[in-house]
């Protein structure tokens, strides 16, 4: 229970091995037990500076924020910050699940609608499950529109301009924000556009998933360890990196 000794041990170890994310999480747990929330945040901030692309670290940090922060906007901004760094990790579904759990607790339909379309933009291990959740959300919204006596037309709203627009910044937020009118009622045509956008993202991500699932399945250790990788693992990583580089997505 001596936080001075604990801090000295972890600080010394993590100076030598800063990529060992599990020890950052353990260090933060000790701080949470013996210190203030600000001290815990200090550890997590050091951690994400050292290992910014570690999904498990962000899951732990965001989980702490959910229990410690009273302002939902602060929690939401932390999730968004995390997603900007690990949103293209095939195993980032752990973080998406935590984000969905948070927004469900807040009962924020607009935020959930944003998540369920954002999660389809890039393949993850649970892509198809998330697509199922997206479809369930759309179905429930369609039922609400029907109860209000409105109809959803069957025409295809996707023009070449619309397809280009979906790549622009703010496209998703505009689609989600446009779902409701000023009176809080769903707009049928906006819901249809939202559905088409999600379907298109899912189709594109599914195609990419087919190309990378072999690489992902061959990864035996998706985290840092001091022991070197064997030749087969290194070969798989090199082939995967070659594929990603050809796609020209620097963040990925």
Image (cartoon, rainbow, N blue to C red):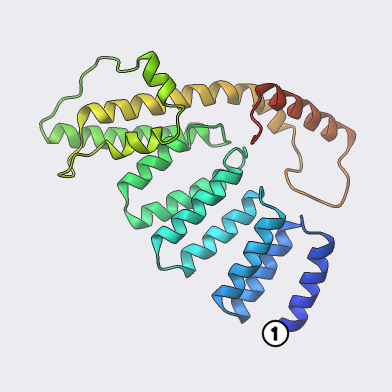
Residue count near mark 1 (Cα–Cα under 10 Å), binned few <14, some 14–19, many ≥20 = few
- In the picture, measured across the screen, residue 14 lies left or right of residue 129, that is right
* Image height of 105 relative to 195, above or below: below
Name which residue lies at 15% across and 25% down: 151
Name which residue lies at 63% across and 70% down: 29
Along the viewing direction, whichever of 180 and 230 lies nearer the viewer: 180
Name which residue lies at 71% across and 26% down: 245
Name which residue lies at 57% across and 55% down: 59
The spot of residue 135 in percent (x, y) is 36, 32
* Image height of 183 relative to 193, above or below: below
- In the picture, measured across the screen, residue 73 lies left or right of residue 252, that is left
- In the picture, measured across the screen, residue 119 lies left or right of residue 210, that is left
Q: Which residue lies furthest to the left in this view?
A: 149
The spot of residue 165 in percent (x, y) is 41, 24
Tell me the quadrant of the picture where the C terminus can be found: top right
The spot of residue 214 in percent (x, y) is 69, 26
Tell me the quadrant of the picture where the N terminus can be found: bottom right
Q: Which residue lies furthest to the bottom in this view?
A: 2
Along the viewing direction, whichever of 68 and 41 lies nearer the viewer: 41
Q: How many labels does the image show?
A: 1
- In the picture, measured across the screen, residue 8 lies left or right of residue 140, that is right
Picture quadrant of residue 38: bottom right
* Image height of 2 relative to 48, above or below: below
- Residue pointed to by mark 1: 1
The spot of residue 37 in percent (x, y) is 55, 74
- At mark 1, the secondary structure is loop
């Amino acid at each position: 229970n001596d936080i001075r000794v604990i801090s000295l041990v972890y600080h010394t170890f993590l100076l030598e091995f800063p990529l060992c994310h599990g020890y950052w999480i353990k260090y933060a747990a000790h701080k949470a037990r013996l210190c203030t929330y600000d001290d815990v945040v200090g550890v997590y901030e050091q951690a994400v500076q050292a290992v910014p692309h570690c999904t498990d670290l962000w899951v732990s940090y965001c989980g702490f924020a959910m229990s410690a922060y009273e302002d939902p906007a602060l929690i939401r901004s932390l999730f968004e910050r995390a997603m900007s760094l690990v949103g293209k990790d095939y195993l980032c579904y752990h973080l998406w699940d935590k984000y969905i759990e948070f927004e469900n607790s807040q009962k924020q339909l607009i935020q959930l609608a944003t998540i369920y379309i954002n999660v389809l933009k890039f393949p993850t291990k649970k892509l198809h499950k998330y697509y199922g959740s997206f479809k369930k959300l759309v179905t429930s919204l369609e039922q609400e529109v029907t109860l209000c006596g409105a109809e959803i037309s069957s025409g295809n709203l996707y023009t070449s301009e619309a397809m280009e627009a979906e790549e622009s910044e703010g496209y998703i937020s505009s689609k989600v924000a446009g779902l409701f009118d000023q009176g809080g009622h769903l707009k049928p045509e906006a819901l249809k556009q939202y559905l088409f956008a999600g379907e298109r993202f899912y189709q594109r991500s599914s195609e990419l998933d087919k190309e990378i699932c072999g690489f992902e399945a061959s990864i035996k250790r998706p985290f840092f360890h001091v022991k070197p990788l064997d030749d087969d693992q290194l070969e798989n990583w090199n082939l995967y990196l070659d594929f990603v580089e050809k796609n020209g997505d620097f963040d990925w």
